[in-house]
Amino acid sequence: MKVKTFSLAVALIIAGAACSPAQDTPATVQAGVAATLTALLTATPADMPTPTPTYTPVPVATPTPQPTLSPTPLPTSTPTPTATPLATFTPTRTPTPTPIPSTTPVPYLTYNQLLYKWYIRYPSDWTVTQQTLPQLSVVFKPPQGFAELRVTTYKGFGKNYDTQSWYQASLQTFQAMGDSVLATKATSVSSRPAFEVQRQALGTFTKVTLVFVEGLDAYWVEATSASENWAVWRPILESLVYTFGFSTTAGATTTIPTATPSSLPVAPICSPAIESQIDGTFEGWTGDTVFKLTNGQVWQQAEYAYTYHYAYRPRVTIFSASGGCKMQVEGVSTSIRVRRLG
């Protein structure tokens, strides 16, 4: 404690000397120091002034705020969207008129050619047109489908031909036109000898032609349809060509044999109904699908429609409906209009 007091006194003396006015003499300074020392040495601890400690506040370091770490969210697994199939665009198609003769009987009319004294029967709903150049032709056509009945008169050709030579000349003409002759046979028309020629024109049309000579004139009486529909049209067309005849008096109906609708077949190809099976795999129809049956017949879709149904050798029924034929397939709720190809 004394050492500390002494040190403090010396410090005070030095401080006091440093702070004395400049005019103090050394003697004065020494006297002052001596007095101060004496006072310090004789002073009791109680007399000593208690120094007030000076505290310099130490700045407390402010902690740097740390950024709050937000947990990074794990990527959410986005389920792969299921592709929605685009709606299939089916172009609207105008259905082609089904080239099938009507199964509804219609009255038959008789066409009389007054100049050449011949006649022929035809359904009353068929149209009739006459062409005079280069030869006289009368053409009959049904209201729907492609088919045609035509009588052509070659005036004066009988001077140079008889029926046999006219038949040979006609064959040469057909071949020169590019037609393929499919079959020929000798026949008769209105009790006159004639030849029947079945041919295919340009691979597209099938024709049956009666070739003969009467007096001074030669004739072609022929029926035509698209080859793909020949099996359907053939019964009625062949019947019509054989209704051709000659009258002794122009237009005299008394010499014309009676022909009623019942005597002319109207393609009863699916009446009564046909029962069979698809020959092999069936996958529905798409617009012009061909169906081969186990009975050997071949049919084709005759109206625009689409359906899918898989089956092996399903049973089918083909029946008469609305002027044509329809096919019902086992397991399919809808029927489809069809035409026979073979």
Image: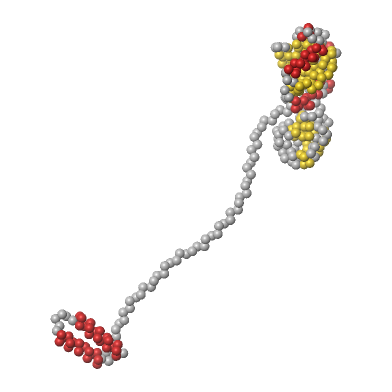
Residue 80 lies left or right of residue 149; in this view the side is left
Residue 268 in the image, given as x and y percentages of width and height: 81, 27
Q: Residue furthest right?
A: 191
Q: Residue at x 67, y 30 (%)?
A: 94
**Quarter of the image where the N terminus is located:** bottom left
Residue 37 lies left or right of residue 154; in this view the side is left
Residue 2 in the image, given as x and y percentages of width and height: 29, 90
Q: Residue at x 84, y 15 (%)?
A: 188
Res. 74 image quadrant: bottom right
* Nearer to the camera, 277 or 7: 7
The answer to whether residue 122 of the structure is visible from this angle is no
Q: Is residue 189 above or below residue 226?
A: above
Q: Is residue 206 above or below residue 257?
A: below
Residue 77 in the image, given as x and y percentages of width and height: 58, 56
Res. 191 image quadrant: top right
Q: Residue at x 75, y 9 (%)?
A: 155
**Quarter of the image where the C terminus is located:** top right
Residue 5 lies left or right of residue 323; in this view the side is left
* Nearer to the camera, 179 or 88: 179
Res. 313 image quadrant: top right
* Nearer to the camera, 211 or 319: 211
Q: Is residue 99 above or below residue 36?
A: above
Q: Is residue 20 above or below residue 199?
A: below
Task: Tell how many labels.
Answer: 0
Q: Residue at x 79, y 26 (%)?
A: 231
